[in-house]
Amino acid sequence: MVEETRLEDEELAVADTPEEGARPDDRIDDERMDEENTLKREFVRSVEDALEAGASGELYDLVEPLHPADVADLLELFEREDRHRLATEITDLMTSEVVAELNDYVREEMMEALPADAVAQIAEQLETDDAVQLIEDLDEDDQKAILAELEPEDRIAIQTALSYPEETAGRLMSRDFVAVPEHISVGDLIDFLRDGRDLPEDFFEVFVIDQRMHPVGTCQLSWILRTPREVQLGDVMKRDQTLIPATLDQEEVGLMFQKYNLISAAVIDEDGRLVGQMTVDDIVHIIAEEAGEDALLMSGAGEGDINEPIREAYSSRVRWLVANLGTALVASLIIAAFGAAIEQLVALAVLMPIVASIGGNAGTQTMAVTVRAIAMNQLTRSNTGRILMRELRVAVLNGVTIAILIGLATAVIFTPMLGMVIAVAMVVNVITAGLAGVLVPVAFDRLDQDPAVASSVFVTMITDSMGFFAFLGLAVASGIVG
C-alpha cells in the first residue's frame, strides 16, 4: 500500500513551477500539435505564410508558445534559406534549449551562419556536454574563434572535452557534479548542499572522493535525507560503484547503464581521478542513436539522416551499391554456368528467385539477431559455438518447413521430381543462410570491424550464390535437364 505524504499549510512546501517555455500538460493542443505530438501541417503552413508575408509580429506570436523541442522541429521542417530567415525573425526564441534539440546537421549549418560571439553566447548557456556537441563538428578555425569568445573556465572545460575521441564518455560527460571528501558528516554535507553555491541545477547523487580526487563511494540524495546529521559520510556511503573510463566508447557506456541499472555514474581519467559524470538522460540519446546507426549501417544507408547533405548521402550509399553490384555478379556467373539447363526447362527460371529470396530473408533474420547480440555483448568468444548451433537448429527447422510447402506446390504445378529438387535446395540454402548470418558478423567483429557495416552485402552474396548453385546443380544432377 502506498502512503500519501501531505504537507500542511504551515509546513514548507515547494511548488512545481514549469520552466519558461516548458509548457505544462496542455502543450498538446488542437491548434499546433496532433495526436502523435508532432506539429500540424496547418500550423506549419501558417508559419510559412507569415514568413513569406514578412509579418514578423504574427510569426513571433505563432512560435513563442512552442516548447524548445518543438521550435527545433519547426526549424528542421524548413529549407536552408527559409530556416535562416525564420531564425532571424525569432532571435529571442533561439535559446540554448532550442539549439541543443536541433538535428546535428541543422545545428552545424546554423552555427556556421552565426558570428562567433553569438555562438559563444549560446554555448555559455549550455551544459558542457551540449556545448561540445554544438561546436565539435565545426571547422577548426570556427572552433578557435568561438573558444576565444568564451570565459576561461568554459573554454578550458570544452577544450578538455574536445581532447577526447569522438563518441566517448569524455566527450559526452557532464562536468557539473557534486563531490565531497569522505571525512565529513551527513550534517556537514546537508549544510553544504543547502548553501547552494556552485551546485549543478540537477543531480541525483553525491560522489565521495579521497585526497587524490579518486571516487571512493556515492550517496544518493534519498539516503542523505534519511540519515541523522551526526553520522559520518564514510559510514553510510555506497562503496561499490561503477566507474566509467573517459575513453570508453559511448555504446559500451550505454550497455553498462543498462546492465547495472544506473541512474548516474562517475567518469574517471587515466589516473583514476573523477572528471565528470554520465546520467541516464544522456544514455537514452546514446541508445537511440546507436540502435538507429546499426540499422542504417546494415542497409548501407550511411547515417541515413534526412538533413544530411546530398553529396555526403550519395558518397555513403553509392560505395555499398557498387560493392553489392560486385557480389551480384558472382550469382550471375553461377546462373550463366547453368544457362543451357535453364533453356531446356523454363520452370527453373521461374523458381530460382524463390530459392534466392527465401535464403536472403533467412540470412537477414539471423544476421540481425547476431549483430544485436554482438552489440549487446550477449555473443562473445565463450558462447559463439553455442549460438552457432542454436541458429543452425533454427535454420534446419525453418528450411524443412519451407521446403515441404514449396516442394508440394512445385510437385503439383510442375513435376514431383522438380518438387523434390527445390525442396532439397531450399533446405541447403536456408541452412547456409543461418551459418552465414552468424559467421559473417562474427568474422567482422573478430577483425575489429563493425559487424553492422558490411555483413548484409556478404550474407546476400552467399545466400544468392548458394541458392542458385544448389537448385540448378541438383536439377542437373537429378537428370531433369541434360
Image: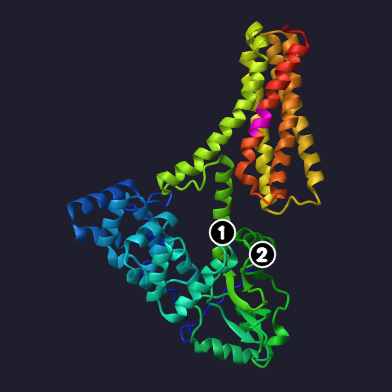
Residue at the spot 77% in from the left edge and 8% down from the top edge: 479
Which segment is the magenta one? 460-464
Can residue 67 be spotted in the picture?
no
Could you say whether the residue bearing mark 1 is in a helix, strand or loop? helix
Q: Position of residue 407 (x, y in %)?
A: 72, 17
User: What is the total number of numbered labels drawn onto the structure image?
Assistant: 2
* Picture quadrant of residue 461: top right
State left or right for residue 384 relative to residue 5: right
Amino acid type, callout 2:
Asn
Mark closer to the observer (2, 1): 1
Crowd band around label 1 with a 10 angstrom C-alpha radius: few (<14), some (14–19), many (20+): many
Q: Nearer the viewer, residue 374 or 206?
A: 374
The residue where tag 2 is placed is 261
Q: CA distance from mark 2 to mark 1?
A: 15 Å
Dot 2: element: loop
**Quadrant of the rendered image containing residue 459:** top right
Horizontal arrangement in the rendering, residue 439 relative to residue 186 (left or right): right
Residue under numbered circle 1: 286
As drawn, 34 above or below 149: above
Locate the C terminus and report the quarter of the image it occupies.
top right
Q: Position of residue 271 (x, y in %)?
A: 67, 77
291 or 335: nearer the eye? 335
Can residue 409 be seen in the rendering of this structure?
yes
Most frequent secondary structure within the magenta stretch = helix
